[in-house]
């Protein structure tokens, strides 16, 4: 029994029957992977197209701004999905990084236009999280969570105390208005399109990560770090890469959010936002980029729906949250998948009866 | 050209699990490592593969393995299987094996977004190599099923294919046929012999003496963390000291 692992011939006719079967298997497997990738990307495009119906839901500036917030939560949530879901790192710093994105773009906005300030904000967040990730490379799980929580608190204190370009208390108004292809983006309705593009691109980039060799390595490092290292995967490098990458999504969302609101204060990036983002990912489902989208819809949407109940709003949200967590232990996306497979098996059964 | 284990010792608190073991494994050699439970066999293999940190020197073909670094061991060409297979349960068998295959800059972030064509080409070659390895261990049909669907014996085979993917010069096997039935053990022996035929050295921990004897001309015996015998298996299995420390119950059985 000799291996055919290295027996690769590119010239047709040069290989034996075994080698032919070999390449057929390879072609099939590669084609399957390609189909799966195409399906994922097409789903994202279809989602983006469907979301173009968003403006139908706008009746007021307010409803548009809620939808914008939902989309930005989803962008930050996708980044958090990469860190917590794909990579299994309990980072508590996502809200602070969102804030870094907001403040860095606010600062840069004094010297440059909107797009450069967003780029700068993402860059700053990457540098900060790379340093944090490298410093904390020996911490695991809960210790990483506690350490990143500490980093978040430090960030909030810096936002509040460092009054280099902000008013005392860390409040600052943003001066820039984005221009896109000659359009001035100055209303929540117009921001919607920018946020939608950001979300669609974020979904595509995250999906490509998940199905790339990097995503494969990341899953391996998450599930069995020692075995992964034994295969030659650098655990530290992989974790830091994904931590920085996921944080970049949050910083982008933060920079957009700051400009959309036109005004930021440190309280916007406190633990409340951190818990919201945790909910987005955990409630949505930890094993798919789509979980973040569903989670954001829940976390932003349910309180808005309950708004009519005035002072009972928080209570209603909390009750719905508890019920949702009990009812969907693997997240909304898990419930959706179960529903889909149930529907699939029902139609199949129906089909076989008909035949 | 060999694996050199020089005065390796590992302590857990006050317990010396491995107490100064010196061994040399020539290129292409097959060495069986036996001993009673708790004699330090697995700990020694863990130290060689960098899973636990120990003292002493471990080097492969002259390049030294950094103590306690599984990554360093892997890069030096040491690969291993585990007593519990340690396969990645949620991904397909194909992906499990592909995880072991050559890693380079096409595994990074840049490759995921920008080097699509180069990455695709390399992935294609990885798929082909991984399928060949799965075929070699008899799992060609399971390529697309998640590893969690396999039986224990199949998972052990998958672990072997994954370890081989790294193209190691030394393969450490921690009880590869424990829990396998006769059929599966035979298949495992056949694959291991073929792997060795291709020049890979084997270091085998096993309690089944017939399996060790059939595969390994040379056997080393550990007892209480120290090497008490090392030589041709006929000679070692006849050594009174070895019989006393380990084989006694077997020969009376």
Image (tube, rainbow, N blue to C red):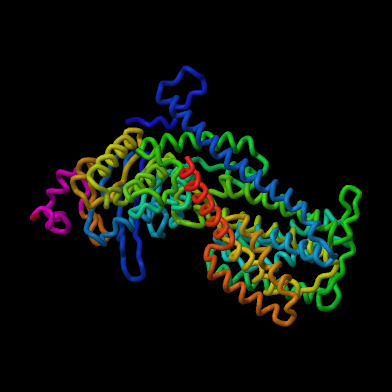
Magenta region, residue range = B229-252
Q: Is B39 positioned to the left or the right of A233 in the image? A: left
Quadrant position of residue A18: top left
Q: Which residue extends farthest front?
A: A354
The x and y percentages for residue B151 are 34, 49
Q: Can residue B62 be found in the magenta stretch? A: no
Quadrant for the C terminus of chain B, please: bottom left
Quadrant position of residue A257: bottom right
Q: Is residue A236 visible?
A: no
**Position of A79 relative to A323 (above/below):** above
Quadrant for the N terminus of chain B, please: top left
The x and y percentages for residue A9 are 48, 23
Q: Is residue B107 visible?
A: yes
* Front position in the image: B2 or B156: B156
* Front position in the image: B107 or B79: B107
* Front position in the image: B66 or A10: A10
Q: Main secondary structure of the magenta part?
A: helix
Name the residue: 90% across, 64% down.
A175
Name the residue: 76% across, 54% down.
A196
Quadrant position of residue A92: bottom right
* Front position in the image: B211 or A186: A186
Q: Is A131 positioned to the left or the right of A142 in the image? A: right
The x and y percentages for residue A116 are 83, 54
Q: Can residue B236 be found in the magenta stretch? A: yes
The x and y percentages for residue A254 are 75, 63
């Amino acid at each position: 029994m000799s291996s055919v692992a290295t027996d690769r011939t590119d010239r047709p006719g040069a290989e034996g029957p075994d080698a032919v079967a070999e390449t057929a298997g390879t072609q099939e497997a590669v084609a399957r992977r390609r189909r799966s990738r195409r399906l994922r990307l097409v789903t994202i495009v279809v989602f983006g197209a469907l979301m173009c119906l968003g403006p139908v839901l706008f009746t007021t500036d307010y409803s548009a701004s809620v939808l914008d917030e939902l989309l930005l939560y989803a962008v930050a949530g996708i980044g958090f999905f990469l860190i917590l879901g794909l990579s299994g790192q309990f980072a508590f710093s996502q809200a602070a990084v969102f804030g870094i994105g907001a403040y860095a773009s606010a600062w840069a906005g004094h010297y440059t236009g909107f797009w450069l300030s967003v780029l700068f904000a993402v860059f700053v967040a990457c540098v900060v999280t790379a340093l944090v990730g490298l410093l904390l490379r020996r911490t695991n799980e809960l210790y990483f969570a506690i350490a990143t929580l500490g980093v978040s608190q430090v960030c909030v204190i810096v936002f509040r105390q460092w009054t280099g370009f902000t008013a005392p208390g860390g409040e600052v108004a943003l001066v820039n208005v984005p221009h896109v292809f000659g359009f001035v983006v100055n209303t929540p309705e117009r921001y919607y399109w920018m946020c939608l593009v950001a979300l669609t691109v974020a979904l595509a980039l995250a999906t490509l990560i998940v199905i790339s060799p990097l995503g494969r390595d990341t899953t391996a490092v998450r599930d069995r770090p020692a075995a992964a290292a034994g295969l030659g995967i650098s655990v530290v490098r992989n974790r830091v890469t994904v931590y920085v990458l996921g944080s970049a999504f949050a910083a982008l969302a933060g920079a957009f959010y700051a400009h959309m609101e036109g005004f930021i204060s440190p309280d916007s990036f406190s633990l409340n936002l951190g818990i919201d983002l945790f909910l987005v990912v955990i409630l949505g489902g930890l094993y798919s980029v789509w979980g973040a989208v569903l989670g954001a819809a829940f976390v932003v949407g349910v309180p808005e729906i309950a708004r009519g109940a005035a002072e009972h709003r928080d209570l209603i949200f909390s009750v719905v949250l508890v019920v949702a967590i009990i009812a969907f232990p693997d997240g909304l996306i898990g419930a959706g998948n179960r529903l889909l497979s149930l529907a699939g098996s029902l139609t199949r059964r129906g089909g076989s009866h008909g035949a | 050209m060999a694996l050199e284990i020089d005065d390796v010792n590992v302590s857990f608190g006050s317990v010396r699990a491995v107490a100064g073991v010196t061994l040399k494994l020539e290129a292409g050699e097959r060495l069986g490592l036996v001993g009673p439970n708790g004699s330090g066999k697995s700990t020694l293999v863990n130290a060689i593969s960098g899973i636990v940190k120990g003292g002493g020197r471990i080097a492969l073909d002259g390049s030294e393995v950094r103590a306690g670094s599984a990554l360093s061991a892997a890069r030096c060409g040491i690969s291993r299987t585990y007593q519990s297979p340690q396969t990645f349960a949620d991904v397909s068998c194909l992906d499990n094996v592909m995880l072991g295959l050559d890693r380079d800059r096409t595994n990074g972030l840049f490759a995921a977004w920008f080097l699509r064509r180069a990455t695709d080409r390399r992935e294609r070659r990885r798929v082909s190599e991984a399928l060949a390895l799965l075929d070699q261990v008899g799992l060609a049909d399971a390529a697309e099923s998640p590893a969690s669907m396999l039986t224990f014996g199949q998972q052990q085979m998958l672990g072997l294919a994954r370890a081989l993917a790294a193209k190691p010069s030394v393969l450490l096997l921690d009880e590869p046929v424990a829990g396998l039935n006769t059929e599966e053990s035979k298949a495992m022996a056949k694959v291991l012999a073929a792997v060795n035929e291709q020049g890979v050295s084997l270091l085998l921990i096993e309690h089944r003496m017939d399996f060790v004897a059939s595969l390994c001309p040379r056997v080393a015996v550990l007892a209480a963390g120290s090497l008490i015998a090392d030589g041709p298996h006929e000679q070692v299995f006849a050594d009174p000291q070895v019989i006393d420390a380990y084989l006694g119950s077997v020969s009376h059985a």
